[in-house]
Image (tube, helix red, strand yellow):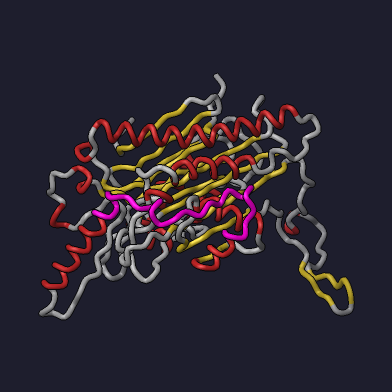
Amino acid sequence: MSKRRVVLAVHGGAGVIQRSALTPELEAEYRSALRDAMAAGYAVLMRGKGERDDDSGGGGQDKEVATNAVEAAVRCMEDCPLFNAGKGSVFTHDGQIRCDASIMACSCNNNAATPPAHPCNTDNNESSITNTSPHQVIQKRRYPSTPHPQAGAVAGVTNIQNPISLAKAVMERTPHVMLIGEGAEDFARQLPKEARVEIQPDEYFWTDRRWRQLESVRKAEREEEQKQKQQQEVRILFQLDHSVPQEVESSHDDEQREKKFGTVGCIALYRSDYSNNKNPPYYQLASATSTGGMTNQRHHRVGDSPIIGAGTYANHLCAISCTGHGEWFIRCVAAHDIAKRLEYKHGYNSTSFDANNDNTLLKKALDEVIFGTLMAESDSGEQGGDGGAIVLDKDGNFAGGMNCPGMYHGWVYEDGEMDTRIFWDES
């Protein structure tokens, strides 16, 4: 029996997501929203495959298919008020909505020329320094080259309907990787219509549910200030998407009891040849992540979602999107750590397609970071960061993991069949 490859996966946030906090109707809404996002991304992958099949000369039509697929899926979740991204974003301390997003992609051509051999593997003891002119000294390449990923990100942007499309425009239309705040918004206003970066009024992003969350945490902050007056110590409270202050943890309000780190993300694999188990002439891996941040966050705080290597990463081996307590994911460079553990520690470093490879190494590298590095206690005694991640490798193996009770996520196989998971103990 041939192996079933996963071609796309999404997540909609992780955290204290319990069955008791989700009505059957709300759970069905989340699963439906995940499927809608996967359907949007999968449709782009299949259109790219169709164009490739119709283009006998190659034509380069498939070069950005995975990139376009993750953008499509994340745009769908940004337009859904269930998720903390785009339209469903949470409010900051000053009552504003500021969004972050990033995208990364790596394209690999297996017909490329063989890279230079490692000097240690040859008998030629030629010096690695070459004088090409009296005024120029350069280093010769000592190690095999690997494909160079491309990346784009935006942080602290307001009134952008789909921040992920703005991040993609940064990647494709500028020499930069990250733009922030007013500069990013000014760039957005200059983009042509085909970039699909729409600017919306404040009213578009306002939701009663998110405003109630801000009022709830502001109230808890005022009460905390009163308690700490004698010690002249004031704790700044913030809320991770649906999380709430301790005193309302016992509330019977299902919406208040759900604690979720609000981020959305998508990872995708596009292969130019799905018809056999040989090396495809071309493949691309891509990852995209978008968020509205934390309720009541201050001072234009930025989390891991727009940070390449922390919340988003893609190279020639795998694509990763993370969700969780952003400060911890930044400190641990979580997404990059997963990818490099896979490559360096577990020896998974070839661009050649391996039909016999399963997700064992992928899952191991993911678990080492999610259940190890991120959960380590800091020197100050602070417990590690909760959250999760989804990972997809070049062979179509998928792994999702979380160190908390739940993560909204799902994946789709190359034949279009989809599956979704929310709770940690779902089989």
- Bounds of the magenta segment: 188-212
Q: Is residue 299 visible?
A: yes
Whole-percent x, y for residue 92 in the image: 33, 62
Whole-percent x, y for residue 144 in the image: 71, 54
Residue shown at 25% from the left, 53% from the top: 243
Residue shown at 55% from the left, 55% from the top: 167
Q: Where, quadrant-wise, is the C terminus in this rendering? A: top left
Place residue 273 in its image quadrant: top right
Whether the magenta-drawn stretch holds residue 194 is answered as yes
Instruction: Please name the predominant secondary structure of the magenta segment in the image.
Output: helix
Q: Where, quadrant-wise, is the N terminus in this rendering? A: top right
Whole-percent x, y for residue 100 in the image: 46, 58
Place residue 299 in its image quadrant: bottom left
Residue shown at 74% from the left, 27% from the top: 54
Position of 395 relative to 224 (above/below): above
Please tell me which residue lies in front, 188 or 265.
Answer: 188
Q: Is residue 341 visible?
A: no
Q: Is residue 353 left or right of residue 12?
A: right
Whether the magenta-drawn stretch holds residue 280 is answered as no
Please tell me which residue lies in front, 59 or 394.
Answer: 59
